[in-house]
Image (cartoon, rainbow, N blue to C red):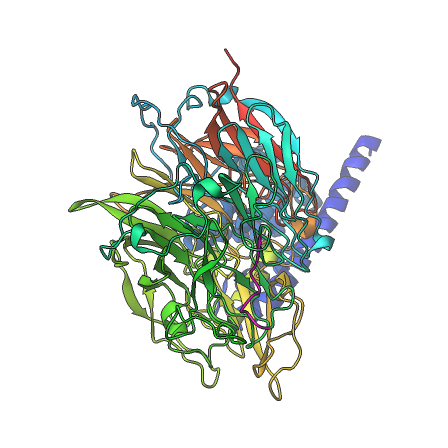
Amino acid sequence: MPPSARLFTRLNLFLTWVLAAVLGLTGLYFLIGGGWLLSLGGSSYFILESIILFLSSAYLIKRSDKAFWLFLFFYVTSVIWAIWDAGFDFWPLISRLMMPSVLLLVFFIVLPYLRQARGKKEARKLSWAGAWLTALGLLVTVWGMFVPHPPVAGPLTGFPLSQAKDGQGDWSSYGRDEGGSRYVPFSEINLKNVSKLHKAWVFRTGDIAISPDGNGAEDQQTPLQIGDKIFLCTPHNNVIAVDVDTGKSIWKAAINSKSKIWQRCRGLAYYDVATAPKESGNTDGTSLSSAPKSDVQPSQTQCQRRLFVNTTDARLIALDADNGSLCEDFGDKGTVDLLQGLGAAPDPQYQVTSPPIAAGKTVVVGGRVADNVSTDMPGGVIRGYDVMTGKLAWAFDARNPDPNHKLAPGETYRRSSANSWAPMSYDSSMNVVFIPMGSSSVDLWGVPRTAEDHKYATSILALDANTGKERWVYQTVHNDLWDFDIPMQPSLIDVPTAEGKKAAVVFGTKAGQIFVLDRHTGKPLTDVKELPVPSADIPGEQYSKTQPFSVGMPQIGAGPLTESDMWGATPFDQLACRISFKSMRYSGLFTPPGTDTSLSFPGSLGGMNWGGISADPEHNYIFVNDMRLGLWVRMVKNSGPVAAENEGGESVNAGMGAVPLKGTPYSVVKNRFMSPLQIPCQKPPFGTLSAIDMKSHKIVWQVPVGTVQDTGPFGIKMHAKMPVGMPTLGGTLTTKGGLVFIAGTQDYYLRAFDSATGKEVWKARLPVGSQGGPMSYISPKTHKQYILISAGGARQSPDRGDYVIAYRLDDK
């Protein structure tokens, strides 16, 4: 036998033994795992196919070509099962068929050797044809991994560019306007020229959000722009003014707030004495003139234009927007202590991470109360302060039957009441503040909750900006046991109805639901149904028999999940996810926690979050981004009330073992619903960007947003631009130029999408990831339009920075 033939034989023998070992081990895994899955009531596919794999492996050891025909039977039945189980959805098919296809390729390569060993014709042409065909299919599949696969494909053609004259105005509030539309009426940067958008300037704040300095320190800001200045806030609440055209520093106010956890700043509030409304009508027929007047007249104040910043160490600070100095006529030399009236509130039980809102003559402040720490926590009181003096105008205490009760000396606000940690909105024509509410403490155990909790927790609350009196309240979750807070600024937009356009409050939830409420009454403008939901086994729990489902609007990434939705990069981790899924109690969106292991999907991390929505008023579209991260939860019964107390950070959601819930008979064990490779167990996408038509209430397009380029299993970067769609934190920006911008993905990009079709039309590489909201403005000096983003690092990435980057078109 010539040397080349001997080498060919040895290589084929080696491949045969390797293939036999792979098939045998796979068969063993399928047998054990498949039997376990079948015992849980799951699919029989794995245990049935394990038998064929064992037989194929045995015949390979005997060097019989029967192994090939057995495997071919396995492959064909796997294809049939995969299509029956997952349809023609790309990523689910990949996880089911990619590895079998690779094994089929190897089989075609060794088939001539197997036939030769049995004294048969080698059939090389047929074998190599099968090998090349399989290889071609694999190459096409790999190519498909780098192509977006939209869950909802958009139209092929877009809107014509608007011919209407561009609007005006600064980005003077967190969501650009007080109503949080995140829409700019500018079209210099548009679909036709966005490809020429380039970096104009970069500013470094000098404040890098390093996790050891805060257990969750993150840059989450959306800057403000007023006139020729950009106003930035950093994770330690330092405030910086830079020039709109050059990014050069103008002034810096060093606040240097400190907290044990959650060191972050989402934004600022701005108030201008000269442009503030002198009179504003209220829905009850009164006006601002009937409200108590400030003791300080505008002409007497030093700060004609002032910035307000909340701090994570519970201060409200007023700064002169012209030079960054403290407004010493506000509060105590520029500062109000937000711990006043709270009682015991050690760091980090009470923090303020979202911006205040300047609502007429009142600056309104909420606050974050740490989740799942204790039944005795600071109250989530919402307070309004005079914008000029800093004097307390009103306090809405959500556990007090008289929510505007004035505290007596030594009295505190009610403990553990529902709080509002997300940004608020304001309608100046109504003089009403719209407040997104969270749940009362502790989040997962509602036995001692009060009637007030059942009214105000996890709701949208409308308050008179002058008096703090309730106008209306609308609850989205009854007795919230999931931490399904309203996580975002409600957007005040006009929506089309059968009776014409109506003033509405539009917002998304962590539960993946979108609600549309009448701004004046709080009544739903789209269909909401109270549907029955299950209970669990916690004694004394006040389970609600029904929950509101916003069926008139699309649900975004909320399931319900089935076993067929389980996913994995390989059949091995897919099987592990199927076993995990079938081992847990899961009954849909409102599966309550109990002493067994239950699945919450989307969990408290998932659904829509604080980035909010953006709107296109010309085409009646809204744009929402989401993340799809499930959590499994188990309540662990203790012998008596828990005395220990956890720190209130994010460790409760990160597999840190039993976390005590002080004052309750339980500890809680929670973790992300992940595969053994630390990939979400449900099928991609794990994060999307969606356009919703507010006329039809349908999703127009939905695209995966983000790739695995800068992340991967066990934190190892894959460096592959596969657009599976990654969890998003941070919101969107919509422009009159037909564009939607987003940067809050796990990879390091700012992207622009065609607002009509969902097609990605531009992207820019960032030095690190971003969790900030993009914003846009027109320079009053050069009249150029800019797109600006803050990039401090993505949630799951170790890479951190302090970049603020502006983009524009060339002067030509």
Is 265 on the left or on the right of 549, as rendered? right
Answer whether residue 130 is visible to the viewer in this image: no
Q: Position of residue 726 (x, y in %)?
A: 54, 46
Answer whether residue 28 is visible to the viewer in this image: yes
Q: Over which residues does the magenta segment extend?
A: 335-343
User: Image quadrant of residue 312?
Assistant: bottom right
Is 696 on the left or on the right of 628, as rendered? left
Q: Residue farthest to the bottom?
A: 639
Is residue 648 or residue 555 the one in the foreground? 648
Q: Position of residue 540 (x, y in %)?
A: 45, 85
Is residue 447 or residue 503 the one in the foreground? 503
Is residue 436 or residue 552 the one in the foreground? 436
User: Image quadrant of residue 647?
Assistant: bottom right
Decide: is 807 above or below 449. above
Is 69 on the left or on the right of 184, as rendered? right
Magenta region includes residue 252: no
Prevalent SS, magenta region: loop
Is residue 696 or residue 807 the one in the foreground? 807
Magenta region includes residue 337: yes
Q: Residue farthest to the right?
A: 3
Q: Residue farthest to the left?
A: 499
Q: Position of residue 507 (x, y in %)?
A: 38, 52
How many numbered marks are there?
0
The N terminus - image quarter? top right
Q: Position of residue 403 (x, y in %)?
A: 39, 70
